[in-house]
Amino acid sequence: MRIFKWTLFFICISVLETSGQQQLEDYKLWLKYQTITNTDLAINYNALVKHAYISQGSPTLRNAKKEVELALSKMLGDDITFTNEWVPENTLVVDVYDNLSKDLKSLIAEEIKNVTHEGFLLKSVNYKNKKVTIISAKKDIGVLYGVFRFLNMMQTHSNLNNLNLVDNPKLDIRMLNHWDNLDRSVERGYAGFSLWNWQKLPEYIDERYIDYARANASIGINATALTNVNANALILTPMYLEKVKALADTFRSYGIKVYLTARFSAPIEIGNLDTADPLNADVKLWWKNKTKEIYEIIPDFGGFLVKANSEGQPGPQNYGKDHVDGANMMAEALKPYGGNVIWRAFVYSEHDETDRAKQAYDEFLPYDGNFMDNVLVQVKNGPIDFQPREPFHPMFGAMKKTPLIMEFQITQEYLGFSTHLVYLPKLFEEVLDADTYQRGEGSTVAKVIDGSLYGNEITGMAGVSNIGNDINWTGHPFAQANWYGFGRLAWDPYLSSEVIADEWLRATYSNDNKFVEPVKSMMLTSREAVVNYMNPLGLHHIFDTGHHYGPGPWVDNLGRPDWNPVYYHKADSLGVGFDRTPSGSNATEQYAPEIAQKYNDVKKIPEEYLLWFHHLPWDYKLDNGEILWDGIALKYQEGVDQVKDMINTWDNMKPYLSESEYREVAMLLEIQLKEAKWWRDACLLYFQTFSNRPLPEGVEKPTKSLEYFKSLKFPFAPGIRPRWD
Ligand code: BDP
């Protein structure tokens, strides 16, 4: 018995040890730089980089140098020589174009012309009968980006022999939005507390801030809004601004600008004014002075991100003024310093009877053309709220004279928190590829966002961060892929989600195709799986109240109609779905005629949007001949089956994974399966009370009653909104 106890003790200790070590590995994200064990490849790479010249000219270039040294020593060992000045033996050259020797300059003179200020060039040249790899750019930040790409190519075992790549970011502002509160709780955060340790700042610079900046720079993210859009005015007080400055100083050499969320009522709360009316002279002056104060200590401050007159947040409408008055007032204050206002379009009002999906468009379209040129309007990808699937937001393409920033949610508020493996670049890609038809066929959302459709001066993409202080940053190891993928798409919204998954898997786990291929296809189907087991065929917003954890299609008692799931599915004995065609809310009129016609026609609309736009009888015939009720039930089952397949895939990957690497994802997949079944059973039992039909063959019987599912309460679910707003 005693021996047994001791054995158990040691097993437990070793399990803890390995999972602890695993978490430390996970901490390194996609910058693991695993040793290259393939001898031929290692020899080839070694020859390419064996004499490396990396400029030391600026903090950013020194970061590039540190990264190259770290990465090459880990991937290839210690026999690489580094020089701070160009010598003829060099085989790798890393520097801004202007600093290069005349000879080298002439070798890349043509290509460098195509490099923009944040872009870079990777080029293999022949110089005096020797192969030289040049990583260059117009600015030092471009060099850093080029270095990260080069190292990524090495991590993914790419052919580096004949490089000739010019890569420029297609968007200007590539930004994370942290919904982090000053008490370090994170709204809709599922990976621990906020990274920003306000109490220890400004003196204490956590090493994590630097690793955060490195990780972001490695994928091209160049901006971060540190605080929650449900803002607290205190962040704008001198004490906090000192702390913000410390973060900005830390991020600067990685090319990252800091933005802050500005609470519209700040002039009252911290400025002793009795109004925040945007046209009031004292209010204007207050924002001007505040902005000046910020730029005095943070000269490259990015600007303000503002949620106004949305979900109870204060805004210009409190004073009978409108979004243009509010945004332009702040834009004027920021203008002399080159700062931007990012004004969110996430608005819907309890006083407005109109379909919630229509309200942002209705409210903002009349303002098109009236904003100052340093105002960008930030629009969520869909017209409701980060659902597992939504049609694209009709403001994209319709708002022709205002630069729109895309807002994606990387944190998985409606996608299983950080316990479900859901590969989001698949969702992002679907939205970016969607055709708005606003200037004829091919007017994709990506073209709206990158400014090419309407020739916007500034462009951008924002992602609501999934980062917290969990050792692995994002809670789920695969949620790191969503951060990575967001960054890659913000750099280039035309990249395919498949290519991104491939890069991420190789850099994070393994280059073995027997691992990469099956796991990649698991990632690529994971998004459809979550749609199937949560919100199939266009169902949406049937989440439990407030925390949005798990199903709550029965919820009908919240203060505002549009906070209740019953508002969105409208199930009754006749059928289910939201009629948004001309016979209903006519939300389709907000789209270009090509889209509107397609969505209005129940025979032409893609089935994935069916119940988003149509209320249909339970026995409506789907494309495959099933009746709607059966189709819904089978989709829920399909989602559960897809999670089972994910579990199988992962089990088969054991030979390519360490025990702890395998186990941490395996355990999470078990949670995902349990919760997928919960979604299926709860939703089907509930909708069955209307359809009055049996579950079709192939759908597993629920193991619990509807009453049981309704009785579940989660007062401590993570990520709930703070109580003070
Ligand atoms: C919703 C979230 C809420 C956010 C809001 C927003 O439930 O916590 O404050 O969006 O984007 O998705 O402002």
Image (cartoon, rainbow, N blue to C red):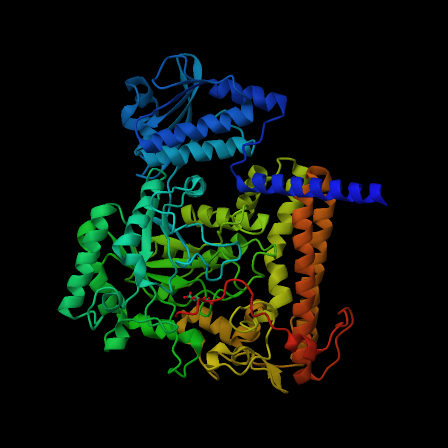
Residue furthest out toward the left: 281
Q: Residue at x 56, y 78 (%)?
A: 569
Question: In the rendered image, which quarter is residue 438 located in?
Answer: bottom left
- Is residue 577 shown to the viewer in this render? yes
Where residue 133 sits: x, y (%)? Answer: 43, 23
- Is residue 372 shown to the viewer in this render? no
Answer left or right for 548 relative to 261. right
Answer left or right for 493 relative to 522. left
Residue furthest out toward the bottom: 573
Question: In the rendered image, which quarter is residue 718 located in?
Answer: bottom right
Is 578 or 530 nearer to us in this picture?
A: 530
Where residue 128 sits: x, y (%)? Answer: 39, 12
Is 199 or 390 nearer to us in this picture?
A: 199
Is 361 or 418 nearer to us in this picture?
A: 418
Where residue 143 sits: x, y (%)? Answer: 36, 32
The correct choice, above or below, for 583 with respect to 53 in the image is: below
Question: In the rendered image, which quarter is residue 659 located in?
Answer: top right
Q: Residue at x 66, y 40 (%)?
A: 18
Answer left or right for 309 relative to 689. left
Quadrant, the C terminus: bottom left
Answer left or right for 133 relative to 263. right
The correct choice, above or below, for 311 with respect to 86 in the image is: below
Residue furthest out toward the front: 2
Where residue 405 sits: x, y (%)? Answer: 36, 58
Q: Residue at x 54, y 32 (%)?
A: 33
Q: Quadrant of ligand 1?
A: bottom left
